[in-house]
Each structure stands twice: as C-alpha cells, then as structure tokens.
Amino acid sequence: MSQSATVVATYSRRMSVQMPDGRFVDARIKGKQLKPVCGDLVSVQPIPNEDDWLITAIDERRNELTRPNSRGRTEVLAANVDLLMVVASVLPRADWFIVDRYLCAAEIMGVEGAVVFNKTDLAGADESVAAELGGYEAIGYATASSSVVTRAGIADVRGLIGDQTAIIVGQSGVGKSSIINALLGRELQKTSGVSGKTREGRHTTVNSVMLELPGGGRVIDSPGVRDYAPVLDSLAAVELGFREIHERGTDCQFHNCRHLQEPGCAVKAAVESGEIRQRRYESYRRCTRKIA
Ligand code: GDP
Ligand code: ZN
C-alpha cells in the first residue's frame, strides 16, 4: 500500500524520504520519467524483501525553483518552498540590483521573499544599507541584519524562517553557508555525504538536502540552490516580479503599459512622487532591457 512521504535528500537517482511518522528511509524511483527533488511530496511503496522504498508518484508542486541546464532544458532545484531568503553583505559589497532580481524571481515562483544583510561586524553597514532595508520593508518584505561572527541578529534570521521551508540565495561569499551552519548550530558537510545503505556500498554525492532546523523550520540546500541566479525572460514576469510596480501599474492608462515611455503611466508618476523608489524602478528597467 502506498504512503505519502517528503523527499529530504537526493543522491542522483537515490533519495532519502521522510515518512509520515518522522522516520527516514531510502528510496528509489520508479521508471525514468519521475524526477523528484527536495521538498517534493511523493507516494512511496515498500519493495518486497528490501529495505528500500519505491517512489511511484510526485504530488502536484506548489512551486518550483528552476534553472536552465546545459542542454537548454529546465532543471528543478527544489519544490514546495515557502520562503526565498536573499542574503547581501558588507563584503562582497551589497549589489541591490542582484537582490531585486532574486526578489523578482521569488514573486514569479509564488514564494515569499525576505532580505538578510550579513557581516554587520565589518565596517560599512551604513545608512544607505538601512535605507535599502527600510525600502524593502515598506513594500512588505521582511528583513534582518546579522553577523555570523558576533551572532548578532542570527535569532532574527531564524525568526524569518519560523516553521517554514526556506531556500537561501545570494552572491557567492555573502555568508549563506555560514548562516546555515549558525542556524543548525553545527557544521554542515559541505559537498558530499555518505549514503550508508547504498547497495553498491560506495560513497555518493548529495545533490540536495532538506535540513531540519532545531525548533522547527527547514532549509533546502544544494550547490545548485547556492549558485542559483534567476533567469528573467519575459516582460510580463518582470512586471509581476516588482510587486509595488505591478500594483501601481493597474492605474496606468494602457493595460499593457511597460512603464518605460508610455503616456499616462501611473508607475512613472509614482516614481516621480517618491512613492516608488527610484532605485527599484532602475532595477525594473535594467531587467526589462535584458529581455528587449
Ligand atoms: P557563501 O558563499 O555565501 O556560502 O559564503 P560563506 O558562508 O562561504 O562565507 C564566505 C566568507 O565570509 C567565509 O570566509 C566566512 O567565514 C565569512 N563570513 C560569513 N559570515 C560572516 C560574518 O557575519 N562576518 C564576517 N566578518 N565574515 C563572515
Ligand atoms: Zn505604466
């Protein structure tokens, strides 16, 4: 009889899944069509006379984090995520355009976004940073500032996740792995893990894991998630991805207004009046230029 389980680690075509009673079991995948990823809810059946279970179906996903692979196909990195947490830092210096692109991707995925400013122990966390974070708060994104070194604000970062399933993204070197370790309270094995019971008896590389945080909540981590860079390939998606622009855009004279040159554009008026931040509008324009 089949049961429903959650995929918590993937090793190529082998998976670790968590059963409804909390137990973790190894699973294989039925056929070649199914491609489960971390976060997936799946149907599993016991394989007679084996310890392994068989994944027979994937439940419909609430959302997917995707990227194009080298063959131009869409690869799914994680599924059923609640929160996309974007990390920026003092060093490398925060690039707010990149933060905006990640938040845009979160909107398109249908996932809540949040912004963390890390490495506050280093000089350079000035008023301009506070203004940016305040700007994100004003349009409904939760923010936190943290230092993994002094531990200041780590509880706030923890609070952003709560009991949700999060992914942590951002430029290389901003402290994503360090934050995950701080949240876990232990060192994460960075790239490889050992699947104890693989029949071949060899070490296999973990593609992706769902890490349970002490006290609730989860973080899905993988090299692909850590290196994730959003692909924004349609104007409609970009417009949807800048929430305050999308919202004000309903007042434009033309329903298909791109908010660039069009007459009667409510977005441009809102930028001029200061209701929409100039810098966010510039990010929006830069994103649309990459498409055109
Ligand atoms: P990732 O590439 O985003 O995963 O970043 P890492 O977690 O690997 O961190 C990159 C570097 O920044 C490492 O040398 C960390 O020790 C350092 N680092 C991470 N967080 C902080 C912080 O809050 N303050 C300082 N000063 N250094 C940090
Ligand atoms: Zn407009």
Image (cartoon, helix red, strand yellow):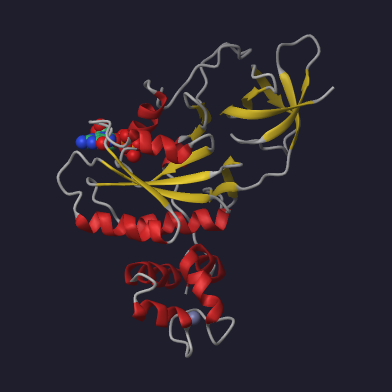
**What residue is shown at x 60% (from left), y 11% (from top)?**
197
Instruction: Note whether 43 is above or below 186 in the view shown.
Output: below
Q: Reply above or below: 205 against 87.
A: above
Quadrant of the rendered structure where residue 155 is?
Answer: top left
- Tell me where residue 136 sits by quadrant: bottom left
Compared across the picture, whether 236 is left or right of 115 comes to right
Q: Is residue 33 above or below residue 149?
A: below
Q: Estimate the x, y position of residue 203 in percent, counting from the top left.
A: 51, 16
Q: Residue furthest bottom?
A: 263
Quarter-of-image position of residue 49: top right
Q: Is residue 3 left or right of residue 271?
A: right
**Whole-percent x, y for residue 146 in the image:** 29, 39
Q: Position of residue 31 (x, y in %)?
A: 76, 32
Q: Position of residue 179 (x, y in %)?
A: 35, 33
Residue sitting farthest toward the right? 1
What residue sits 85% from the left and 22% below the top? Answer: 1
Q: Residue furthest top?
A: 49
> Which residue is located at x 52 percent, y 32 percent?
217
Q: Residue at x 62, y 48 (%)?
A: 63
Nearest the camera: 2 or 233?
A: 2
Q: Is residue 224 visible?
A: no
Number of callouts in the render? 0
Residue furthest to the left in view is: 123
| Nearer the observer, 289 or 166 | 166
Q: Is residue 80 visible?
A: yes
